[in-house]
């Protein structure tokens, strides 16, 4: 037997405290290392019935072979005579199994080298498994981390036991990520690698908005208010469709909170990103009208509504066309993502000029009616557009500015 002492057990306890790796894993690794070293010592790969045993009371470890007690020994590696077995254990009988110590002399240095390699490998494997299991559970949820550094436009975020990667496409455009700052991120994916698992996080994912609303709005957490859909262009604007499962609870008001306290907290977390709270409706016409707010809508015609296509033709007042389309098409694009409907918007004057028939085959005709000059004119109007307040009672639009409290109170 080889004397180890108490240092090993102290090291095991320290590893368990620091990395969460149990003492049993370390002891099992040490025993496996002893067996591996013994096989190398014999220069044999297959040595049957060999195991290492650690006595925690004495702090000693040794290599043992299990042999069958027989009357006539035919294979000395697997069998032992009754007479020899009696010297080890007086109570042994024929056909019993006995463990015989076979620890070589001067085996300590060889075993120590092998044990170091095996234990290091096992610790890495155990650590990798712990991290993988932990973040597999966190996948699809929000977590808080600390920004470490920026490498090749990727942001490295420490989220506990490992560093996560935030790719450039998952960052908010124009956002400055300063090392040392705390950041709330969405765990997008966990990839198993030969070393520690690679965790991919996002600061631009639409689910971040969902998680923030669930944290700030108790009615959502309790299931009274339900988030039906979210469309987001990170850093600029988000539309979120909500519905109430209780007729006595106003879903939009619940999300706003008293004097806008809930929505302002979320806006602050999203760095003053504009948020439109839209009332969900099973009626597609009503839903599209709500989604396009704050623009006023004259009419909505359903062109196609089946499993292959969902298209709607919307007419707005002339002075509302730029607002309905939004800057660089943002408003209508977010409304399309939110509702799942393809939306074609025309002003009243444009609709009056063409022979409108509510059928998809006329889509090209609608597009041809708007000339390049008119498109440039609309784009110019959008660029000069001031920030708009609430125009529809079924939609709340918020921005993180000084005038926000007034808008909420109104």
Image: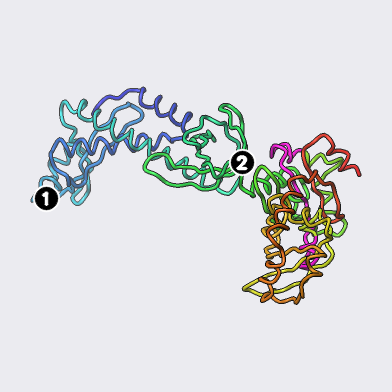
Question: Alpha-carbon distance for marks 1 and 2?
Answer: 80 Å
- Magenta run includes residue 266: yes
Q: Which residue is mark 1?
A: 71
Q: Which residue is mark 2?
A: 172
Magenta segment: 265-289
Image point (82%, 49%), residue name: 254
Viewer-nearest of discs 1 and 2: 2
Which residue occupies the extreme right position in the image?
A: 410
**As drawn, 194 above or below 306:** above
Rendered-image quadrant of the N terminus: top left
Q: Is residue 401 visible?
A: yes
x and y, in percent, of residue 295 in the image: 81, 55
- Magenta run includes residue 19: no
Q: Is residue 19 left or right of residue 173?
A: left
SS at circle 2: loop
The mark nearer the N terminus, 1 or 2, is 1
Q: Is residue 82 left or right of residue 179?
A: left
């Amino acid at each position: 037997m080889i004397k180890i002492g108490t240092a090993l057990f102290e090291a095991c306890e320290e590893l368990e405290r620091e990395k969460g790796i149990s003492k049993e894993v370390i002891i099992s690794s040490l025993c496996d290392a002893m067996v591996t070293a013994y096989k190398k010592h014999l220069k044999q790969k297959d040595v049957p019935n060999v195991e290492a045993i650690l006595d925690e009371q004495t702090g000693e470890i040794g290599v043992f072979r299990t042999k069958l007690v027989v009357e006539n020994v035919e294979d000395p590696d697997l069998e032992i005579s009754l007479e020899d077995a009696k010297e080890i254990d007086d109570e042994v009988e024929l056909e019993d199994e006995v463990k015989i110590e076979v620890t070589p002399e001067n085996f300590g240095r060889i075993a120590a080298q092998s044990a170091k390699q095996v234990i290091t490998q096992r610790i890495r494997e155990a650590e990798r498994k712990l991290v993988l299991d932990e973040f597999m559970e966190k996948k699809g949820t929000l977590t808080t981390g600390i920004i470490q550094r920026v490498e090749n436009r990727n942001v490295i975020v420490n989220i506990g036991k490992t560093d996560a990667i935030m790719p450039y496409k998952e960052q908010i455009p124009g956002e400055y990520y300063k090392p040392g700052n705390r950041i709330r991120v969405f765990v997008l994916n966990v990839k198993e690698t030969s070393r520690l698992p690679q965790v991919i996080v996002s600061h631009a994912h639409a689910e971040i908005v969902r998680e923030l609303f669930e944290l700030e709005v108790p009615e959502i957490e309790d299931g009274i208010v339900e988030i039906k859909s979210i469309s987001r262009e990170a850093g600029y604007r988000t539309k979120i469709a909500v519905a109430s499962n209780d007729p006595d609870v106003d879903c939009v008001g619940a999300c706003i909170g008293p004097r806008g306290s809930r929505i302002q907290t979320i806006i602050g977390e999203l760095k003053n990103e504009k948020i439109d709270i839209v009332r969900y409706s099973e009626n597609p016409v009503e839903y599209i009208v709500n989604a396009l707010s704050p623009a006023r809508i004259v009419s909505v015609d359903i062109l196609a509504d089946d499993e292959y296509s969902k298209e709607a033709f919307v007419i707005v007042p002339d002075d509302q066309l730029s607002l309905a389309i939004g800057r660089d098409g943002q408003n209508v694009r977010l409304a399309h993502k939110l509702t799942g409907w393809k939306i074609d918007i025309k002003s009243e004057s444009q609709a009056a000029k063409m022979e409108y028939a509510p059928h998809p085959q006329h889509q090209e005709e609608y597009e041809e009616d708007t000339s390049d000059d008119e498109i440039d004119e609309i784009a110019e109007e959008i660029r000069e557009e001031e920030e708009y307040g609430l125009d529809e009672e079924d939609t709340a639009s918020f921005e993180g500015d000084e005038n926000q409290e007034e808008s909420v109170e109104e």
